[in-house]
Image (tube, helix red, strand yellow):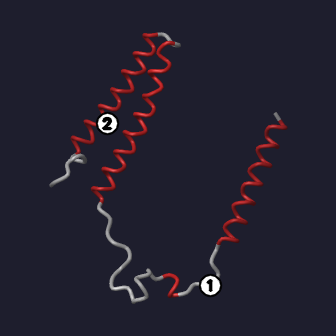
Amino acid sequence: MIILLISILITLIISVVVMVLASLLAKKTITDREKNSPFECGFDPKGSARLPFSLRFFLIAVIFLIFDVEITLLLPLAIIMNFSNISAWAFTGFAFILILLIGLYHEWNQGALEWAY
């Protein structure tokens, strides 16, 4: 038990030292106005490089990623069907799909899936 605690402590110390060294060595020491400005073919920038980002697009992208990851979690259910108890397999699959459908209904009810206002 003592060896495990010592190894965890040594690992944490090494990780912190590496992170501190990386942050110190990665910092830019010289800040230049030309380096920090956006590049537009040698001309002065006409507007801000930071355009407003559509919150609706961001929300749709996050919902897509969530459901995409959940689908990849559902795929192994087909593989383990032969190796597990069929009632436990069916309950797990049903519970997972039910959670997906509840989440989809919640997003739909909140209006997050509508493209036009």
Q: Residue at x 66, y 71 (%)?
A: 26
Figure quadrant of the N terminus: top right
Q: Is residue 1 above or below residue 43?
A: above
Looking at this view, name the residue that lies furthest to the left.
117
Residue found at x 39% / y 45%: 65
**Relative to 24, is 77 above or below?**
above
Task: Quickly name the residue at label 2.
Answer: 103
Percent coordinates x, y for residue 10 in the rendering: 80, 49
Q: Which residue extends farthest right?
A: 3
Residue placed under numbered mark 1 in the picture: 30
In front: 16, or 58?
58
Image marks 1 and 2: residues in contact by CB distance under 8 Å: no
Task: Give residue 55's position: percent from left, percent from top.
Answer: 30, 59
Q: Is residue 85 above or below residue 55?
A: above
The residue nearer to you, when weighing 64 against 3, is: 64
Identity of the residue drawn at 31% across and 69% down = 52
Report, in whole angstroms, how far the alpha carbon at label 1 lies from the one at label 2. 48 Å
**Where residue 62 is drawn, which disc sits there?**
none
103 with respect to 37 (left or right): left
Mark 1: give few (<14), some (14-19) or many (20+) Cα within 10 Å: few
Marks counted in the figure total 2
Question: Residue 34 location, x and y as percent?
Answer: 50, 87
Q: Nearer the viewer, residue 29 or 109?
A: 29
For mark 2, give the secondary structure.
helix
> Label 1 amino acid?
Ile
Q: Nearer the viewer, mark 1 or mark 2?
A: 1
Q: Position of residue 88 (x, y in %)?
A: 45, 14
Q: Which amino acid is tagged 2? A: Gly
